[in-house]
Amino acid sequence: MTVAKRKSPDRDECPDEQLKAHRQNPDLTRACAWVAGFFLLVTVLPLAAADPPLTGPATEKRFPPLQVPPGFKATLFACDPLIEYPSVIALGPRVGSVFLAHDYVTGLGFDIVRRDEVRLLEDRDGDGYADRSTVYAGGFNSVQGLAFHGGTVFVMHSPLLTALRDRDGDGVADERRDLLTGLGLPPEQNLQRLHGANGVVLGHDGWLYLALGDHGCDVPRPEGDRLVLQGGGILRCRPDGRDLHIFATGLRNIYDVALDEDSTCSSATTKTTAATTRTGCITVSSGPTMAIRICITNGRPKRLLP
């Protein structure tokens, strides 16, 4: 049996007249290539110019505006790429500056591929928008609490409370000391990175108030003994870590602490079950122990007396 083979057309037999013209005129081919490259460049340049702004009022257009009560105004102080994976902030050493934690340990999943950083954000030109982000210190576990007072930055990152200082004023910490350990679990033993060492605040009475989740603590105190707490609570210590003691207990996942002028603590807490998640505010006075828990379930507040 004879199989007929299809004859491949000769290049000169190509029916495309434009292709023939290009082959017969190399100068025309080069000119078309130059024009195509020019239009490609013109197309790419506007795309590059459309990259999101780094700082300034134009950054406000990247996000929907916040809805705030009458008399209030909310502006965008900083966004990516100046910051990423933010977890907590604290007022900085100068007007227009804040300390901010980049929480890579929690933000990047179960595997620890990068440790957390504390950054110093600054608005150097006074326009109300941060324009510089400096790594103040790094190598932290999941940072859930920051406070700044008297030149010291206090960092809560389970299981540690760490103090940082910038002695030479260059915007980078050059002194670091772990004041306490045993506050919650290290991230290697707590894949969710939750319910451990949370917020920290310096009270008007000169004490540090520490919010502790329901993993509790087992802390070797500087005085030589140990403080053990099962469950969540609020701890208190001196700014150098001495005199650590329990300020309030019988609580659960205390996330942060706020103090009024009478050193009354208000703290946020959550309780999650298979069916519901309850968020509440707990108020603890500094006199005889008194706690009022206000639980919010399905959007409706309900007061529960102790």
Image (cartoon, rainbow, N blue to C red):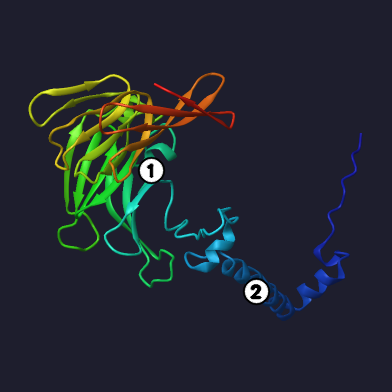
Is residue 64 something that shows in the picture?
yes
Residue found at x 15% / y 62%? 168
State the residue position of label 1.
103
Tell me the quarter of the picture where residue 81 sits: bottom left
Tell me the quarter of the picture where residue 18 sits: bottom right
Give neighbour class at mark 2: few <14, some 14-19, many 20+ (Cα, 10 Å).
Answer: few
- Asked if marks 2 and 1 touch (Cβ < 8 Å), the reply is no
Q: Quadrant of the C terminus?
A: top left
Residue 287 sits above or below residue 6 on the image? above
What x and y, as percent, mark residue 57? Answer: 52, 68
Q: Is residue 46 left or right of residue 126?
A: right
Residue 34 sits above or below residue 160 on the image? below
What x and y, as percent, mark residue 29? Answer: 72, 75
Tell me the quarter of the picture where residue 189 sits: top left
Callout in the foreground (2, 1): 1
State the residue position of label 2.
42
Of the image marks 2 and 1, the number of the one nearer the N terminus:
2
Secondary structure of the residue carrying numbered label 2: helix
Residue found at x 18% / y 39%? 178
Residue found at x 19% / y 26%? 219
